[in-house]
Amino acid sequence: MWQHVIAQQETTLVNRTVFFVSDRTGITVEALGESLLTQFPEFEFNRHTIPFVSTPTAAEIAADRIRVAGRADGLPPLVFSTLTDEASQSIIASSSEFVFDLFGTFIGPLEHALGAASSHTAGRMHGMRDHAAYEKRMRALNFTLNHDDGLSPATFHEADVILVGVSRCGKTPTCVYLGMHYSIMAANYPLTEDDLDHPRLPEFFRANRAKTYGLTIAPEQLSRIRRERRAEGRYSTLAQCRAEVASAEAMFHNENLKFLDTSNVSIEEISATIVRDLGLH
Amino acid sequence: MWQHVIAQQETTLVNRTVFFVSDRTGITVEALGESLLTQFPEFEFNRHTIPFVSTPTAAEIAADRIRVAGRADGLPPLVFSTLTDEASQSIIASSSEFVFDLFGTFIGPLEHALGAASSHTAGRMHGMRDHAAYEKRMRALNFTLNHDDGLSPATFHEADVILVGVSRCGKTPTCVYLGMHYSIMAANYPLTEDDLDHPRLPEFFRANRAKTYGLTIAPEQLSRIRRERRAEGRYSTLAQCRAEVASAEAMFHNENLKFLDTSNVSIEEISATIVRDLGLH
């Protein structure tokens, strides 16, 4: 990764302007568009997201912005769109030579596969609330926030998963993502020096062992992260980080816990791995 | 929305099996696939996500699962995939008559648009850490968790946005989403009866008014949400909810604050709207 970044900096990157156009939040079109753009590392992309393009009028305004950028660049921008309204899509399609219709491209083939016409209603992903699903998600997120950093162990039995690991190895953001994205009730418990003196799970954990999952991290990275938070003292020294990580991993082995090294993995990947490993989806 | 659900329940839904196949987390393929499926409300889809299909061997295992499901159904499953490896994609492509290649479909046209060959490296969306971006995101999320529910107002000046609104109108999940997805430092402040007696922002807010954003909600929905949390007492009565919401909205008008009704809007949409309205992206 670092080598790659350095290599990029040594060559001259080619600039291109990119628009993500959506009739809702733009979150999905950004995600797929970005993953396509990573295939072209020699370019420097100037990105613009235009969300909530839900009427032909809004599409006209967006198309004008795209044309202005194209004239300024002297090159047609790349446009990734997910618009359900065909009239709006055709307005966007006229704004550049290079419009990628991530939604409409698949509607025809999908109609064929299902032997049914599409309803052509506004996209509902990230859209109007499904109240039951919304409340489940909010319950999960509230549970997660109330069971962060070893809080409320008395109700750990209600959790779907309990993450354990040393301080700053990624437990909290992973729990928040599990709650927010997967509606999973996720608790976490920090392994302190007291726990690590004796590399077994604390006694009160026994009953929850099957849903306990370990996180670990490279000591060098842990030390760097801890220095950001607290530069002085033993907490962030490499020796201390090495000792804590070694004890935590010994505990995971002793307890036969599944665990994951978070060092070069995004929060999304850590979460998806836990969901898969514990069969939670 | 409710009428739509009721109409669905009165008719017989047609069942189809759907697979989302990804070489990373599956988050993107699920999001775009789901938004395509919402166009066919007369179907009941049985969904399966297969993440981390990053080798031809993993693709063979996934393809077998898809074939087994197809034989059980007597109908080819729908398969949405985002695989960057062409060999793996062609294995998946052979597993069903209806495979939608959300990634590969656009690589050729994108190569044409950029006049460059794609690198064919594994998808990096939600992938390996970009350390600077990761740390910004973690700082934002930590800030958000440390500034929830009116905590630490002394450092509100460091926030990118401060959400205000009555208890249970959606401030906390929105702040968490803003931190997690957009790396925005989001604080929130609950409007209590004391604040609402006098429908102006508390004095200490003055300096932060430009980044303050209001959330409101239909009193009926607020009452329902509050009853889940605390069934008894004045807190969740419709009369109390009506009075609080009316005072909060009066304050938003008095202070000329931008605000949003969260009643039928997802957390993603609330967040994307705030980002757009405050120009934060």
Image (cartoon, coloured by chain):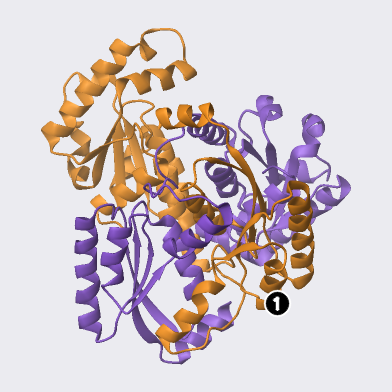
Chain colours: A purple, B orange
Neighbour tally class for label 1: few under 14, some 14-19, many 20 plus, Cα within 10 Å = few
Determine whether the residue tagged by mark 1 lies in a helix, strand or loop: helix
A98 versus B34 height, above or below: below
On the question of residue A232 being in view, the answer is: no
Horizontally, residue A240 falls left or right of residue A201, namely left
User: Which residue is located at x 67 percent, y 32 percent?
Assistant: A159
Residue that sits furthest to the top in the current view = B233
On the question of residue B1 being in view, the answer is: yes
**Residue B212 image position (x, y, % from top left):** 24, 42
Residue nearest the observer in this picture, B271 or A156 = B271
A145 versus B105 height, above or below: above
Q: Quadrant of residue A11?
A: bottom left
Q: Pick the quarter of the image with the C terminus of chain A.
A: top right
Which chain contains the residue that carries disc 1?
B
**Residue A215 image position (x, y, % from top left):** 70, 52
Three-letter residue code for mark 1 = Ala
**Residue B95 image position (x, y, % from top left):** 72, 64
Residue that sits furthest to the front in the current view = A115
Horizontally, residue A213 falls left or right of residue B217, namely right
User: Which residue is located at x 54 percent, y 45 percent?
Assistant: A181
Horizontally, residue B13 falls left or right of residue B180, namely right
User: Which residue is located at x 36 percent, y 45 percent?
Assistant: B269
Q: How many marks?
A: 1
Residue nearest the observer in this picture, A122 or A154 = A122
**Residue A210 image position (x, y, % from top left):** 80, 38
User: Which residue is located at x 51 percent, y 55 percent?
Assistant: A111
Residue nearest the observer in this picture, B39 or A20 = B39
Q: Which residue is mark 1?
A: B87
Q: Pick the quarter of the image with the N terminus of chain A.
A: bottom right
Residue nearest the observer in this picture, A133 or B225 = A133
